Amino acid sequence: MGRRRRASLEETVAARLSRLIEPSVLYLLGTGVAAHGYDLLTEVNTMGLTDTQVDPGAIYRVLRQLEAEGAAVSTWDTSGGGPARRNYELTELGRARLASWTNVIARRADAMQKFVEHASELLKED
């Protein structure tokens, strides 16, 4: 029972990492690796910032929000054989936002590393 409960707690914590979808999308748009929703979803899931699969709706919500705020722009791609797809591109504002996220994540990474070290020591005492 304890093991099952721990897995549930770990899943809960991992789900909270979904806030990292926005910086992941900004990064991917900046690199040009992915430009539309499905490719972004695939790449965000392979980045490994969360232990769970990202909900496709979350990607599209982030894209709409970034576009509404001027951090990304989109155009319709009708060149393929299938339905038209919306391709997204990072703007200068989006680059600035990615820089801000990078600073925040770097500070958090340092703090998290210190937390892991201290918590590990505490748990060794038990």
Image (cartoon, rainbow, N blue to C red):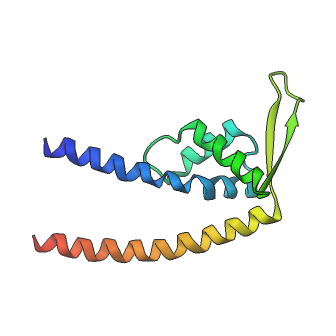
Q: Position of residue 110 (x, y in %)?
A: 45, 77
Is 49 on the left or on the right of 84, as rendered? left
If the image is split into quadrants, where does the N terminus sit?
top left
Determine whether 63 is above or below 77 in the image: below
Determine whether 112 is above or below 73 in the image: below
If the image is split into quadrants, where does the C terminus sit?
bottom left
Determine whether 25 is above or below 120 in the image: above
Is 86 on the left or on the right of 110, as rendered? right
Determine whether 46 is above or below 22 in the image: above
Is 55 on the left or on the right of 120, as rendered? right
Q: Residue furthest front?
A: 68
Q: Position of residue 41 (x, y in %)?
A: 62, 41
The residue drawn where x is 78% and y is 65% is 93
Q: Residue furthest left?
A: 126
Q: In which quarter of the view is residue 81 placed?
A: top right
The residue drawn where x is 61% and y is 67% is 101
- Between 20 and 30, the one lying in front of the other is 20
The residue drawn where x is 66% and y is 43% is 40
Question: How many numbered tags mark residues here?
Answer: 0
Q: Residue furthest right?
A: 79
